[in-house]
Image (spheres, grey):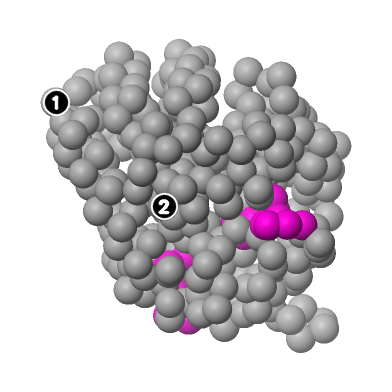
Amino acid sequence: MSTHSPGTDPRAPFGARLRHAMDTRGPLCVGIDPHPSLLADWGLDDDVEGLRNFTHTVVDALADRVAVLKPQSAFFERFGSAGVAVLEAAVARAREAGALVLMDAKRGDIGSTMAAYADAYLRADAPLHADAVTLSPFLGFGSLRPALDAARESGSGVFVLALTSNPEGADVQRARGADGRTVAQAVLDRLAAENEGAEPLGSFGAVVGATLAEADADLGINGPLLAPGIGAQGATAGDLRRVFGSAAGNVLPSVSRGVLRHGPDPEALRKAARIEAEQLAEAIG
Ligand SMILES: O=C(O)c1cc(=O)[nH]c(=O)n1[C@@H]1O[C@H](COP(=O)(O)O)[C@@H](O)[C@H]1O
């Protein structure tokens, strides 16, 4: 992991900016998940001031060196508008310091209201504009169209849930449609179509948990594969090759508690992130 800035044209599509960030800073996304238990471990109160202190500490320690920071929106929303204001400031501060920001909001809705979510996160001048956002395809992949179009227009990205890291995900995601494909494969195929011809990497990513026993799916979507589950959920860097096979080079491993538990000392956070990034780069390199 280096402190090198992503340095590509800020107007380049998300996939190109992410490729550059992963190549120069190392393939690591650190999740900003201010759990009440982590706030307590850091000696902070479970209130807006504690949330702000926690979030700024993580951003100031890591935004100039990790490829991606991923704030989990719910932990901010639980404090209402004051918490969302902390999130908004953190997104701006992290992007200013050179990190790409993936807003973990897991949105999905009928097309007409999906357009409003797209406005909230993907429109270039939106207060909560991030480099990318997580989306849920449960209302049908086609319902995400307004977000896909908005991302293309603003040079942002999306990560659509395909094979999630939680054990309950398989009920829905491994179910087979009339054509024999699993739901997850149908999502992956639609993402591959969105990324067709994109170089060096498409902007339409999938979420595929590092905790899976095996992917058992074609992950060749020419887009990034967000891999949560490393650390607190039990997966390790060593699992990535087995799960992702030849697609490992496009994997963006994501760690939240596994890094955050080393705070609040900024130097300890930086060290934890550096070790993770080095191990992950070696595992998928
Ligand atoms: O979209 C995600 O980020 C996500 C998808 C998934 O399948 N599993 C998963 O754990 N996540 C998120 O990744 C983070 C995992 O946190 P840790 O288990 O603490 O590393 C949480 O913010 C989850 O919401």
**Which residue is disc 1 drawn over?**
43
Q: Is residue 103 in view?
A: no
Residue 21 vs residue 155, the one in the foreground: 21
**Which residue is disc 2 drawn over?**
26
Q: Indicate the position of residue 101 as horizontal and vertical percent values.
A: 53, 36
Instruction: Give the amino acid type for the residue marked by disc 1 in the picture.
Output: Gly
The magenta stretch is 198-215
Eye-nearest disc, 2 or 1:
2
Residue 218 shown left or right of residue 269 in the figure:
right
The image quarter in which residue 237 lies: bottom left
User: Can you tell me whether the CB of the residue at mark 2 lies under 8 Å from the nearest atom of ligand 1?
Assistant: no
Residue 90 shown left or right of residue 7 in the figure:
left
Taking the magenta stretch, the answer to whether it contains residue 201 is yes
**Residue placed at 74% from the left, 81% from the top?**
181
Give me the C-alpha separation between circle 2 and circle 1: 30 Å
From the image, which quarter does the C terminus lie in?
A: bottom left
**Residue placed at 83% from the left, 55% from the top?**
142
Residue 36 shown left or right of residue 214 in the figure:
left
Residue 93 vs residue 138, the one in the foreground: 93
Tell me if mark 2 has few (under 14), some (14-19) or many (20+) residues whose alpha carbon lies within 10 angstroms of its own: many
Q: Secondary structure at mark 2?
A: loop
User: Can you tell me whether the CB of the residue at mark 1 lies under 8 Å from the nearest atom of ligand 1?
Assistant: no
* Earlier-in-chain disc, 2 versus 1: 2
Q: Main secondary structure of the magenta part?
A: loop
Q: Indicate the position of residue 84 as horizontal and vertical percent values.
A: 50, 20
Q: Is residue 282 above or below residue 272?
A: below
Residue 186 shown left or right of residue 38 in the figure:
right
The image quarter in which residue 271 lies: top left
Instruction: Give the amino acid type for the residue marked by disc 2 in the picture.
Output: Gly
**Residue placed at 66% from the left, 43% from the top?**
14
